[in-house]
Each structure stands twice: as structure tokens, then as C-alpha cells.
Image (spheres, rainbow, N blue to C red):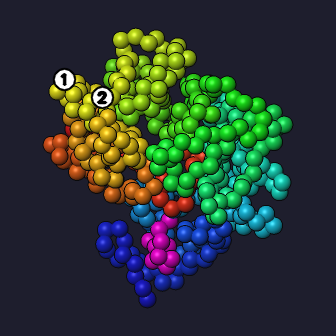
Amino acid sequence: IKSIKNADGGEMADDSTATVDVQSRLRKGRDQDPVLTVGVTFPDGASTCAHAVLLCQDRLGEGIRGDPMGDPLDRRAARRLVHCQSMTVTSLVNLEEDPVVVDAGPSLPDDVAIYASRRSSAMYVKGSYLGRQAGLGKNGLTNAYREINGAADGYPGWIVDRYDKWLFVQQDEGSVSVRGPLPSLHDGYTAGVYYLPTKSDRSIMGTTDKVKPMLLEGQAAPESIPVLENGIQYLVNLGESFSTGIFLDQRMQRAWLAEHCTSETRLLNCFAHTGAFSVAAATAGASTVSLDLDKKWLDRIQPQMEANGIEWDGRHDCIYGDCFDWLARLAKRNEQFDIVILDPPSTSVGKKKRRWSVKHDMAELVALAAPLVKSEGVLWTTTNSASLKPEKFAKMCEKGLSDAGIPNAKLERVSPMPSDYPSIGTQPVTNLAWRIP
């Protein structure tokens, strides 16, 4: 008879007669991270979802995907994958395999269904196009999102983003990558397709590469494409560089700004790029300061503000300069902000030609930014570095806060990736929000 330790270190009731039956295995395209769907059966008696979580950890050696007991920083699904009563699992590579249906019950929550029931939720049948045809594809307030996210959607190395009627396709160089599907140019929703060969670690793109996207088929896009995200208009460019001007995986963070900012909010957007965070906050009335070392990106902020009916006046400003340098300058001026956003590239060269990276310099960056946050304000720290684990990134941020004399800052929120960015293993982008006391 085997007992299992509970979360508090005590022993649970005897679970030796409980069963854990593997219903399906998803392996194709996920060699490093196979996913099991299991059914857990307890004998008569009291049991909780915590028992099921611990039982799976004990029997399978791995936690339940998205549960904080399995990974405290991976909160994509919380307890929804424990509570769900119905799940369909299919292969997106071998179309001859029949789906495995676990029980039969009510439909899954929308944010889980996109992972678990792709053949039905994406209207996927043999010969058709796999994309977000349901959900985001029918959202009248958003027409910029990810259609296919590589291996997590069954196509390793194949990324398809939609910007209204144009698609932006990225394909990893190397033998692992496979050419995935694309919608027809005659479907009424697609005017043209741009293609960009990429590296598997997109966080280093642009450091040395000067490759530009090319028009693969269809009509060329205008210089600036107006796209909608949660009813807010942004301007993107598909033919200029590897960056279109907006990072679609930050949609939830922009939505948070648009919902929670007010006319009393003052925001500092560091490494602002084209200012998408600033635009989202400004639509709610916030005043903004956008800081970046590349003037061509900053020049694109004002047109986006004006496209949303926001006057470019004294409430909005752009600073062209090095973030490390300007954070120190703003501190000397005793500037204070309700929200400070740090979303740096994984590595870059500063104004003084000094090479820096998130992996080595994030703590210093946090120490410079934290004093600019008002009491009860929020410091956002974000990274897309594929080589930096969330736990290590969080510890670097904690060190920076401690160095700034704020050791009791509270990690208030770990923001997950949006539903159109399913991932294998650790999410590629880490978003942490710290409340400054």
C-alpha cells in the first residue's frame, strides 16, 4: 500500500486502488514533450482534484499541464484540465488516425478547446486549411492573430500570422521544419502571402540578419496595413523587416492596459518599438512616454494614436535614446509612473556600442526602472528569450528589485500566452507583473 504526500507534506488517504488509465498519446511533432490524456478513477470515498494532480505526478512522474502544482509559473489552464468532462485528441499530421474521445460531455471552455479539440473547433477535415476558423476567425473586433503556431499545431517550424487579408509566414531553416498548409487566395479572406525564412530561436532575429520578407503569392500589401485588435487599430508593415510592428503574443497585455488604465494613469514604455502598449493605454485615456533607440519605430507611434482618434498633444511623448541611459536620467528628474514596462529584445547594442543581453543584464535594467514606479504602481517585465527559463528570469527580476531597495515587491501576475499561441513545454514568452509597495 502506497501513500502519497499532499501539498502540505502530510499523507493523503490510501490511493493504492485508484487507477490512472492512459487514454491517448500525442507524440507527432512533440518528441521532447509528449502529451498524455489520462482518466483517473478513485474507489468510493472522498477525493479532490488535488488528489488527482498528486496521483498523476506520482504514477507518471509529471504534473498536469497548466496546473500550478506541476509548474508554478505555467498557468495556462489552471484547474480546467482537471475539471473538464470531455476532451477530443487528434493527430494533425497523420489524418488517417481517428480521434480519441474521452467520455462524452459538455464542450470544453473556449480557451482549452483550441488545444484539445482541434479537428472540430478549427473545422479541420482532410484537405482543408487548419487555422483559427472558429473563435478568433469570427471575432469582428480582432483581425490580427496567429493561425498556425508550429509544432504545437502539428507543423514544426511553420508559423502563419494573419494581418487582416494578408498572411505573414515564417519557416524555420533546417530539416525538422515542414511546410504546412495555407488558405486559398480565393477563400474571400486572403489577398496575399508574405514569406520569411527564420531561425528556430526568433528572439535573436534581427541582431545580424538583414533578410526581408518576400511576397510569395497574391497582392502586395500597402505600406501600412490597418489591423484591429480588441477594437483598437494598429498599423503594420509586412515587407520591411522580420518585425511587422506589433507582437501578436502580447494581445492579452494590451487588452489589460485598455481595460485598466484611466486618465490618471501615467505609463512609461521602455523598448517601445512602434508603441503598441502605449497606444492601448492611450485609448483608455492614459498619458504615455515611449522610449526606444530606433527613431524609425518611434515615428510610427503618432499615426497609430491619430488612427484611434487620440490627439498627439502634451500627454504623449517619445524619447529617442538608450534605455539604460534614460532610465537613470528620468530617476534624477524624480519622474514617477503608474506603470513601467520593460520588454527588451533578447540582445542588442546600446548607444555606446555596448552589447548587452537579457540573460546577463536584466537585473541591472530592473534596478534602474523600479525606482520610477509609484507606490502601488506596477512594473512589467517581459522576455522572449528561448534560452532563459521563467524561474531564472523571475529571480533576475527579484535581484534587480532588491538592488533598487525594494525587496518586498510582490509578483502579482504571471500572464499566459493567448489561446492562438499553444506551446510545447515552457511558454516561449514570460510576462511578469510586480506590484511595488
Badge 1 element: loop
Q: Residue at x 36, y 11 (%)?
A: 314
Which region is colored magenta? Answer: 54-64
Quadrant of the rendering where the N terminus is positioned: bottom left
Q: Residues within 10 Å of mark 1 (few under 14, many from 20)?
A: few
214 or 106, which lies in front?
214
Q: Horizontal placement of 50 versus 411: left or right?
A: right
Name the disc covering residue 338, or none. 2
In the figure, 395 relative to 21: above or below? above
396 or 204, which lies in front?
204
Q: Residue at x 47, y 18 (%)?
A: 302
User: Is residue 429 part of the magenta span, yes or no?
Assistant: no
Q: Amino acid at mark 2?
A: Asp
Quadrant of the rendering where the C terminus is positioned: top left
On the image, the x and y values in percent for residue 206 come to 49, 43
Is residue 98 in view from this perspective? no
Q: Amino acid at mark 1?
A: Arg
In the figure, 317 relative to 419: above or below? above
In the picture of the structure, the residue carrying the numbered disc 1 is: 333
Q: Horizontal placement of 167 versus 19: left or right?
A: right
Badge 2 element: strand
For the residues marked 2 and 1, what is the alpha-carbon distance in whole angstroms?
A: 16 Å
284 or 208, which lies in front?
208
Q: Residue at x 33, y 19 (%)?
A: 264
Q: Main secondary structure of the magenta part?
A: helix
